[in-house]
Image (spheres, rainbow, N blue to C red):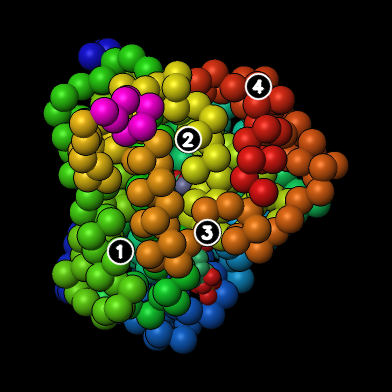
């Protein structure tokens, strides 16, 4: 077990009546002039934006609004938000939506705290943030975990680069989490979300060194729980208990709890996906499902003990007489693919709906290498040529 710090300051307000607490929480965290930020249509259609505005009006809290955040959120929208928020002296950023909207808020928050510098430099890893305006969310999709994470992922739509910047400065102040708000999600988004939730814990699980028994047990329990309820939601999208289990798992999977005592995670699958998101605008979770099996088969021999444990404790693989560690690990990866198919997720890029050319694979691998500063990986240290090989395997 390695030394660790655990910083999970986000106040979670969970359940059917959570939204009632919104106005008081904005005030408690010092918000007096709020930017309400949201995505395309869903939060307008459900009436959630009107409800949020009414709650702020009733509390006498000034607000302006900016919709139109797209999945794989754009830098251009961040700039629009900065302009509007600056013109209106906004001091609090409220995301009504999912990871894309929350991340757009975080980026606006970074930019407003440091108006003299170009915000993209954070995502290009050229400097660190000086501050961040307070951010909070009314969550409408269980997936990215941005409601409690220190991560922010923005796409520069002009260059096609999708890049993450992690900093505790942007940890959200609070998250309003009513599982009912996620019942309108299309099945594909629900399944992609479940995939992403699992992957946030799997990235922390498939590491060499520094494991902690309690952390592993929490991680395995979370993964089994998400698999169980992801399958239930396929047939019963309005099952409250299932929505609630998945929603809470989404926040715990990415607030660092499931990696404590470890080396901080591998995160190569995420890096591989971010390049796909930047080039092909794929849904994040589905993109992860499309690359993970190939990544796993490429690296498992270098992280055998974790792949064996995963197969047995999470995927329920029974070691029969004569089975080697290799057989058990590969059976676990195959079982994971079966699970992805059971919830209609892809297991390769073709099933994801993209067929990158050789040139595009070279570009994806180069982008990935650039994003990670040359090499990355704990299950196995990987370089540009490895990234290219995994993309080829995932075709
Ligand atoms: O735009 P609207 O109309 O709202 O539709 C959204 C969007 O199309 C829809 N949706 C959301 N809530 C809904 C709903 N549709 C019906 N009913 C509802 N209640 O779902 C679609 C996806 O929304 P998005 O916010 O993009 O989803 P998600 O939470 O998966 O966020 C994905 C983004 O987060 C990044 C991803 O890379 C991607 O850019 N990530 C952020 C992380 C973080 N900040 O910690 C970590 C993750 O690993 C991830 O990289
Ligand atoms: Zn993710």
Residue 27 drawn above or below residue 297:
below
Q: Which mark is residue 346?
A: 3
Residue of label 1: 230
Q: Mark 4: which secondary structure?
A: loop
Of mark 4 and mark 1, the one earlier in the sequence is 1
- Give the structural element (helix, strand or loop) at label 3: loop
Residue drawn at point x = 55 percent, y = 40 percent:
294
Q: Is residue 389 above or below residue 38?
A: above
Could you tell me how far apart the alpha carbons at marks 4 and 3 are, in whole angstroms? 25 Å
- The answer to the question of whether label 1 and label 3 lie on touching residues, with beta carbons closer than 8 A, is no
Mark sitting earlier along the chain (3/2): 2
* 50 on left or right of 366: left
Closer to us: 330 or 89: 330
Which of the two labelled residues, at mark 1 and mark 3, occupies the earlier sequence position? 1
Give the image location of residue 47, x and y in percent. 40, 85
Q: Quadrant of the N terminus?
A: top left
Task: State the residue position of label 2.
Answer: 296
In the image, residue 327 lies in the stretch drawn in magenta: yes
- Neighbor class of circle 2 (other Cα within 10 Å; few <14, some 14-19, many 20+) is many
Residue 285 image label = none
Q: CA distance from mark 3 to mark 2?
A: 15 Å
Image coords of residue 265 (percent x, y): 41, 27
Q: Which residue is mark 4?
A: 383
Query: Is residue 193 highlighted in magenta?
Result: no
């Amino acid at each position: 077990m390695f030394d660790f710090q655990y910083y999970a300051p986000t106040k979670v307000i969970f359940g059917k009546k959570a939204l009632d607490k919104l106005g008081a929480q904005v005030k408690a965290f010092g918000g007096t002039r709020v930017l309400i930020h949201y995505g395309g249509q869903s939060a307008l259609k459900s009436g959630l934006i009107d409800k949020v505005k009414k709650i702020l009006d009733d509390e006498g809290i000034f607000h302006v609004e900016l919709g139109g955040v797209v999945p794989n959120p754009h830098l251009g929208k961040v700039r629009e938000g900065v302009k509007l928020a600056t013109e209106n002296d906004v001091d609090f950023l409220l995301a009504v939506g999912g990871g894309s909207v929350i991340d757009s808020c975080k980026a606006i928050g970074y930019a407003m705290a440091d108006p003299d510098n170009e915000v993209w430099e954070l995502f290009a890893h050229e400097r660190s943030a000086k501050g961040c305006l307070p951010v909070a969310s009314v969550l409408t999709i269980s997936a990215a975990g941005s409601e409690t994470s220190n991560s922010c992922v923005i796409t520069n739509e002009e260059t096609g680069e999708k890049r993450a910047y992690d900093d505790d400065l942007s940890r959200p102040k609070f998250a309003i989490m009513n599982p009912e708000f996620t019942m309108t999600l299309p099945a594909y988004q629900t399944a992609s979300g479940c995939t992403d939730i699992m992957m946030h814990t799997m990235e922390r699980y498939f590491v060499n060194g520094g494991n902690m028994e309690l952390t592993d047990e929490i991680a395995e329990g979370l993964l089994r729980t998400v698999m169980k309820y992801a399958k239930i939601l396929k047939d019963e999208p309005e099952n409250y208990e299932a929505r609630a289990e998945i929603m809470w798992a989404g926040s715990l999977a990415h607030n660092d709890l499931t990696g404590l005592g470890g080396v901080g995670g591998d995160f190569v699958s995420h890096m591989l996906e971010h390049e796909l998101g930047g080039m092909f605008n794929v849904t994040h979770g589905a993109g992860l499902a499309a690359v993970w099996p190939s990544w796993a088969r490429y690296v498992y021999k270098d992280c055998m003990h974790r792949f064996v444990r995963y197969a047995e404790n999470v995927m329920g693989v029974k070691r029969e007489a004569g089975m080697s560690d290799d057989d058990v690990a590969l059976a676990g990866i195959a079982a994971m693919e079966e699970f992805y198919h059971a919830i209609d997720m892809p297991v390769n890029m073709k099933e994801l709906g993209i067929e990158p050319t050789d040139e595009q694979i070279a570009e994806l691998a180069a982008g990935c290498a650039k994003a990670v500063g040359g090499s990355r990986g704990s299950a196995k240290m990987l370089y540009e040529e490895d990234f290219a090989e995994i993309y080829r395997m995932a075709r």
